Image: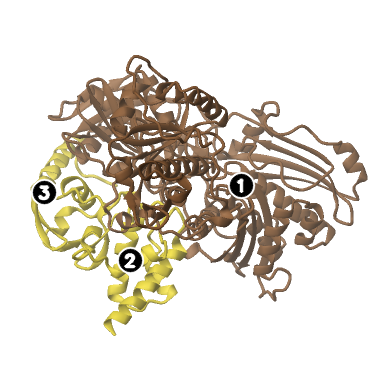
Amino acid sequence: MADTIEVERYELFEDQRYQFNFDRRQFMKVFGGGIALIVPLTNVLAQTAQRQGEAGRGFNRELPKEIGAWIHIDEDGSITVYTGKVEMGQNIRTSLTQAVAEELHVPVSSIRLVMGDTDVSPFDAGTFGSRTTPTMAPQLRKAAVAARETLIALAAQQWQVEPSAVRIVDARFVNHDSTKSLTISDLAKGLKLVKTIPGDVKTTPAKEWTIAGQSTPKVDGRDFVTGRHKYTSDVRRDGMLFGKVVRPSAFNATLASSDPVKETPGVQVLKDGDFIGVAAQDQPTAGQVADEINPQWKAADQPGNAQLVDYLRKNATASEGAGRPVGSIADGLAAADKKLEQTYTIAYIAHAPLEPRAAVAEWVDNKLTVWTGTQRPFGVRQELAEAFHLSEEKVRVIVPDTGSGYGGKHTGECAIEAARLALATKKPVKVVWTREEEFTWAYFRPAGVIDVKSGVKNDGIITAWEFHNYNSGPSGIEGSYAIPNQNVQFHPSKSPLRQGSYRGLAATANHFARETHIDEIAVLLSMDPLELRLKNLKDERMRAVLDAAASRFGWGKQKLSAGHGVGIACGFEKGGYVATCAEVSVGSPGGKVKLERVVASFECGAIVNPKHLENQVEGAVVMAIGGALFEAIEFNNGAILNARFSRYRVPRFSDVPSIEVVLLDRKDLPSAGAGETPIVGLAPAVGNAIFAATKTRLRSLPLVPRGVIL
Amino acid sequence: MFHPFPNNCCLVLQSFQKLWEDSEVSNISALNVNGKKLPVDVDAQTSLLMVLRNNLNLTGTKYGCGEAQCGACTVLIDGQPTRSCVTNVGRVADKQITTIEGLEKDGQLHPLQDAFLKADALQCGYCTSGMIVTGVALLDKNPKPTREDIVTHMNGNVCRCGTYLRIIAAIQMAAEQKGVRNG
């Protein structure tokens, strides 16, 4: 390791072109001078790079083909971290800064993160799947360790001492008796040093963290509470026009005919196939002209909510995704004392990020730059490059910190629309989707149908488990129960609506079906549902979150008022464990369901930022309330019928119960992502609590779309 | 609805009505925003939200739904929390408009802005301007709100990230601080 962090100066040759993911000249422009620490995407590549480096072939040879992240220490001492991840409320700008500050031994405030800018950030598949904390944070830690060691080596070289004699005190490098000190700028000045990080850099273990593990406040929080932060929809360019797209009457509709558009001064209308867009100098004019166009569309008949369950079953394909059957369901059922078979359904729901999709596009000398709030800046760059037949170097996507996504902003529709209008008008164009457009033309969390068949012995040992999920997806489908005979299958289907990622993906659907079914088995056996779970769980981490939630909640010890009921559920997904207890009250008469209290315990390895983690868990619980109780997309014949906040209810202040979050900090385990998994436990816990209160079993999400048990 | 005129008359009537509407329409030449008189040149029917964001570049006020359902666009009109997305600019030309940008005084955050940071009462931050402005209106009217007062007053504002409990805590925190200050 020492060899590869040895101070070297590299010549930069212009005659070779390396696949740097971003243009090498651009890298040099951004890099300028100072020190760059480059993290290869994989350890294998890192080792290759290390060997090449050791062979003394210099900078060009050492550059890895795929880069995960890089840190730049400029000659003025400023520290900039480049990552392709994006910030949309999950607070990774803060947590990643903490990781770098920790290893570099500098304050959080001295580090700036450049995120999601395809010209300067290394390639990244996207910010989803709770991957930032387990993958990006360790990469940046390694780069920061290498940066620290490089600076120490530079100081040691200047003072002609061993690197071990150099210490870092308050972001200054000092010698053994503190008689000499150098700033980062002193050390980086005049350098042009590019280093690749080897794969085996030792980073600080969680037990020794001093900056990570603390509740560092949101690094740029002040910009948000003052309204200064610029989201995509706030970006403004000189000469910018406002764009508006004329939407079809239904999904999959094509243009039948349209009257000639009357000329309006200063307004341009672009017709291209089935696309009609308007660009005007002000937003109201663009909207008015687009409204007046009103063409004829034609579309085939399409199914609605009423046909959904049949449609998903009928169009299902062979199983894929989940594991092979274990044991024999027939044997498991034969060994059982009791059997149970039930079906659960899950509605389409919308992400409804408060900032709808937005994009500002600008063409300069055949190069396209688009500001847009997406979770996949490089994916959107590719979409744009394909749409406009450009090479990817000719497209730059910049993602300002975004007004949330929850898995709903993976695609680049709005970016393409803005770029189309900008190309036609030769001016920068901003397109901001209306709420109705966001509800209609984005995509939804998949609906699903899940069949579960089980067998159980009278002592509570589950002997057979057959689980078929149609359409909603395989995430979290396996479950943690140690059941000897299992057949768990995911069957993709055709979806009447455009569907895609969502916080937790199908884990919410699969946990709802599984954890409701477990509760039904407990009822069948007249056994406490917590006891039944513990009888069938071997995973110690799952048992620990269940114990933590049950103990805080006072499970089994409460004296409940009339009409109240409690429920419990647990789950595992994306490296995190959650257990959720809920208390509901059901009004009599009327059957009005009210969520009274929630306890959620969560364990995701070593905690990086306790306050932000608690905030994420709370937020996941609140978001889950919507999907559990009342959120559902109503649709028919290619149209969304409730595409507004006045018709599509999302959780509000008055829906939020008392929420207690119990965090288990496992410093001995690597940190996992936390934005998604805490969402999965709420729906089954609430459904089970409603059953406890009313003896009515609800097997469809949302449980009470009209707020009452009918 | 019964209409006494044949179709062609109806058209005449419509265009007349349009004219009549147009004659009502005037241009607005200035707005009082955050204590300053700012020149604008906009149709009186334009929404205040668009004028703030597009003409005055005060982008702290956000578009969220366009139908007064989410509160992201909330501003104060003579101290009253108002949904700027459904407010025509003509109706507020002679009134005092306060936006999120107007709450910080001489580099000093409003106690509620400060409390939002301390309580970590945001994630993506897109609802934050509207939440703070709505909360400021509450504290001005009711310096010691109960939890129930807060829920009732704030219920028209959506935080999709689900930081409601932290927002309640922030408003309570600011109320206590203001109480201390005033005391």
Which tag is nearer the camera, tag 2 or tag 1? 2
From the image, tell me which residue sits under label 3.
Answer: B25
Estimate the spatial distance between the alpha carbons at disc 3 and disc 2, rounded to whole Å: 41 Å
Question: Relative to residue A426, is residue A220 depicted above or below?
Answer: below
The disc labelled 1 sits on which kind of residue? Answer: Thr
Tell me: A69 left or right of B142: right
Question: Relative to residue A218, is residue A389 depicted above or below?
Answer: above
Q: Nearer the viewer, residue B110 or A453?
A: B110
Q: Percent from the top left, x then y, of residue B133?
A: 29, 63
Q: Which mark is residue A508?
A: 1
Q: Nearer the viewer, residue A468 or A200?
A: A200
Marks 1 and 3 belong to one chain: no
> Callout 1: helix, strand or loop?
helix
The disc labelled 2 sits on which kind of residue? Answer: Asp
Q: Nearer the viewer, residue A380 or B140?
A: A380
Name which residue lies at 57% across and 45% down: A504
Estimate the spatial distance between the alpha carbons at disc 1 and disc 3, rounded to whole Å: 52 Å
The answer to whether the residue labelled 3 contacts the one labelled 2, judged by CB atoms less than 8 Å apart, is no
Q: Percent from the top left, x then y, of residue A353?
A: 42, 46
Name which residue lies at 47% across and 44% down: A145
Circle 1 marks a residue in which chain?
A
> Callout 2: helix, strand or loop?
helix
- Chain B rendering hue: yellow
Quadrant where the image shows the C terminus of chain A: bottom right
Q: Percent from the top left, x then y, of residue A649?
A: 47, 53
The disc labelled 3 sits on which kind of residue? Answer: Val
